[in-house]
Image (cartoon, helix red, strand yellow):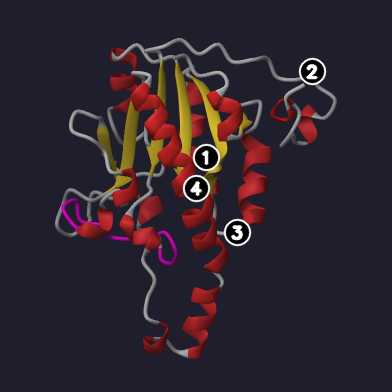
Amino acid sequence: MAGWKTAWRSFYYDGAPEAPDPVLVKGKVALLVIDVQNTYLARPDPDTLSPAERAREAAWDGFHERMHGTVIPTIARLIERFRATGNRVVFARIASLTPDGADRSLSQKKPGWNDLFLPHGSEASQVVPQLAPRPGEVVVTKTTDSALTGTNLRLLLGNMGITHVVCTGIFTDQCVSSTVRSLADESFDVIVVEDGCAAGTMELHLRELEIINRIYCEVMRAEDLIGYLPD
């Protein structure tokens, strides 16, 4: 029995039957990489920060360790596998088209963590070099949390004949979750790769997986997914 079939379950699915094996057909499954952008991996010089700022920055150490040690290598491995087998790799990134960021959704304008202005052409808004899109791969630009709500991604996936979307990226409890829910509402079959995602803390990451698992997606690790991918 595959461990993923009964893992990451919420109260709602305690005791429910195990998840079925996904049936992934070549050409109908796409890997979606969400918001793995330079801005989220940048770290300020500690010497330029006040003690309070240093403490807040240090709280992100676990996130950066997971991104560099687990998430980025996992996504890179999946990208390589999807490309090698002729399956689609699609990217979504946050970037404003207007010079003042007026096109951002309300959720991206609220004061605090979400208030991030990323001009479309800026280095900060680009996908990290380790996962850089190749020419011809779809990259959608969004000013919303969901990669579907603020883009034509739903249309593009439909046009390409995609039925199953494998989601990776950041942040599990924000843009990944929002995208997963939108995909499910549009009747795509969704898989979330646990070791291909991260939130600000592992607690938030695992809690969100528990919330979205089974109803909006199936959660599994990369090694589980690779066993189902068509050659």
Q: Tell me the tag on residue 177.
A: 1
Q: Amino acid at mark 1?
A: Ser
- Inspect the image, locate mark 4, and give the three-letter code of the amino acid beneath it: Val
Please state if 200 lies on the left or on the right of 90 as rendered.
right
Ranked by sequence position, the earlier of labels 2 and 3 is 2
Q: Secondary structure at mark 4?
A: helix
Q: Is residue 98 left or right of residue 53?
A: left
The type of residue carrying mark 2 is Pro
Local secondary structure at mark 3: loop
**CA distance for labels 1 and 4:** 16 Å
Label 3 crowd bin: few (<14), some (14–19), many (20+), radius 10 Å:
some
| Residue found at x 44% / y 14% | 231
Vertically, is 152 above or below 205?
Answer: above
Image coordinates of residue 104 in percent, x first then y, are: 29, 50
Rounded to the nearest whole Å, what is the CA distance between mark 3 and mark 4?
13 Å
State how far apart marks 1 and 3 are (Cα): 15 Å
Magenta span includes 152: no
**Residue 41 picture location, percent across and down:** 39, 61
Q: Residue at x 76, y 20 (%)?
A: 18
